[in-house]
Image (spheres, grey):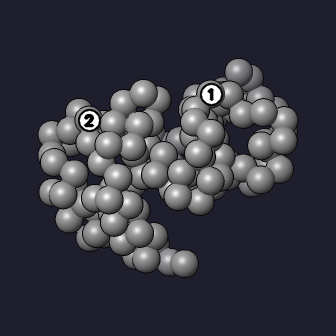
Amino acid sequence: SDAWSLRQSIASFLVQNPNLKISDTALQDWIRWDSGMSVNAYARILRGSVWGGGVEMACFSVMKNRTINVFVGRRDNTYKLISSFRGKTGSGPPQNEDWAESINVVYQGRMHYDSLAHVTTLHR
């Protein structure tokens, strides 16, 4: 699927699941804290051409029941795991069996994420 279709799916998921808990907090609360908006207002904006962040990764993770690991690069050319969205099983550090099927991204700052193909050196 393309980026536009993915945004539409995630926006619909948000509207249909405002009380879904991510790390013991409802999506509607995450959205209000992050943007100051209601779920419906946020979803309308998301349906446009804006970039997603943590809320959208959490939703995608649950929708597809896939682990999404977020890393930051370190000065010594290694990566540090800073967040892990664990699909329907919740959050927390990934288990060994998660790595083969996980989606790994590196946070580049200013709400920008890039794909990270292979995680070979990891500091937790």
Q: Can you tell which quarter of the image residue 74 is in?
A: top right
| Outermost residue, top side | 124
Q: How many numbered callouts?
A: 2
Out of 5 and 82, give the one closest to the viewer.
5
Q: Amino acid at mark 1?
A: Gly
Question: Looking at the picture, how far across and down is residue 110, in whole percent?
Answer: 38, 42
Left or right: 100 as drawn, with respect to 45: right
x and y percent of residue 36 in the render? 15, 40
Q: Foreground: 24 or 53?
A: 24
In the image, taking residue 35 as reference, residue 14 lies left or right, namely right
Q: Secondary structure at mark 1?
A: loop
Q: Residue at x 41, y 37 (%)?
A: 21
Q: SS at mark 2?
A: helix
* Residue pointed to by mark 2: 29
Q: Residues within 10 Å of mark 2 (few under 14, many from 20)?
A: some
Residue at mark 1: 92
Q: Could you tell me which residue is drawn at 36 percent across and 30 percent down?
A: 25
Q: Camera-side residue: 111 or 85? A: 85
In the picture provided, is 71 more to the left or to the right than 51? right
Q: Quadrant of the N terminus?
A: bottom right
Mark earlier in primary sequence (1, 2): 2
For residue 16, side relative to residue 108 (left or right) = left
Say above or below: 59 vs 91: below
Q: Position of residue 102 (x, y in %)?
A: 72, 50
Q: Is residue 9 above or below residue 14?
A: below
